[in-house]
């Protein structure tokens, strides 16, 4: 996909061109699907949300056929990253809710009383989300970078282009953000 082509279609759709609006989803669908599949591959086993469903839900949250005003391709994909993040967080919260047994500790079937609880991927998504909100309050650009990397699966050069920074800056920001988030997640878990 030519990045300028998407920006032009977004601008034409904003100006009221219905045919341009209809061309946006087919143009970005493959890329969004690829990014969603990469993101879902990092999810724990047992994840019921499929990449196609994630893309469709993100598209609907972005406005579906009635797309809001997008400044450019970067603006669109940043919004898509945020939509995917919120969908994954909402899904984790829903699965973790009391009516779904969220308060029940998961242990192995052969628990002897000495087994540790199985890792809870939903809880990890919720912790990452909370830590990411704290990072956004501290440094919004680094938080946006993490959203594009973690929730959408963009590569550093794509993130750099999307955010208008150099690849070296993106690399440094990601290293900082990973360390900062790791420390924040430990704090949220009560681990020193």
Image (spheres, rainbow, N blue to C red):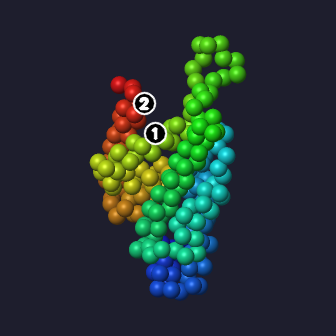
Disc 1 versus disc 2: distance between alpha carbons? 8 Å
Q: Earlier in the sequence, mark 1 or mark 2?
A: 1
- Residue 117: % across, % down: 58, 24
- For the point 50% across and 62% down, the residue is 80
Left or right: where 144 falls relative to 152: left
Compared to 32, does 174 lie above or below?
above
The answer to whether marks 1 and 2 mark residues whose Cβ atoms lie closer than 8 Å is yes
Q: Which mark is residue 28?
A: none
Instruction: Rate crowding at label 2 as few (under 14), some (14 to 19) or many (20 or more) other CA atoms within 10 Å.
Output: few
Q: Position of residue 172 (x, y in %)?
A: 32, 48
Establish if 125 lies above or below 72: above
The picture places residue 189, in percent across and down from the top left corner, at 42, 30
Farthest residue, direction front: 99
**Disc 1 marks which residue?**
127
Name the residue at 58% across, 55% down: 36
Residue 141 located left or right of residue 147: left
Q: Quadrant of the C terminus?
A: top left
Residue at (58, 51) in percent of width and height = 38
In the displayed image of the protein, which residue is found farthest to the right? 109
**Which residue appears at 59% of the width and 27% of the height?**
105
Side of 146 relative to 30 (left or right): left
**Where 110 sits versus 49, above or below?**
above
Residue 189 numbered mark, or none: 2
């Amino acid at each position: 996909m030519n990045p300028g082509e998407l920006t032009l279609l977004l601008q034409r759709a904003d100006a009221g061109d219905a045919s341009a609006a209809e061309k946006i989803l087919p143009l970005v669908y493959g890329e969004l699907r690829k990014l969603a599949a990469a993101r879902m591959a990092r999810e724990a086993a047992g994840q019921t949300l499929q990449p196609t469903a994630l893309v469709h839900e993100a598209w609907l949250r972005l406005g579906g056929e009635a797309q809001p005003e997008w400044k450019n391709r970067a603006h669109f994909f940043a919004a898509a990253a945020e939509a995917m993040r919120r969908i994954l967080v909402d899904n984790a919260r829903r699965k973790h809710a009391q009516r779904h047994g969220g308060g029940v500790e998961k242990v192995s079937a052969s628990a002897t009383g000495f087994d540790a609880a199985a890792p809870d991927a939903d809880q990890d998504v919720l912790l990452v989300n909370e830590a990411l909100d704290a990072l956004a309050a501290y440094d919004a650009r680094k938080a946006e970078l993490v959203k594009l990397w973690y929730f959408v699966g963009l590569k550093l050069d794509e993130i750099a282009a999307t955010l208008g920074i150099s690849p070296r800056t993106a690399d440094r920001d990601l290293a900082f953000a990973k360390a900062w988030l790791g420390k924040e997640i430990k704090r949220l878990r009560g681990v020193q």
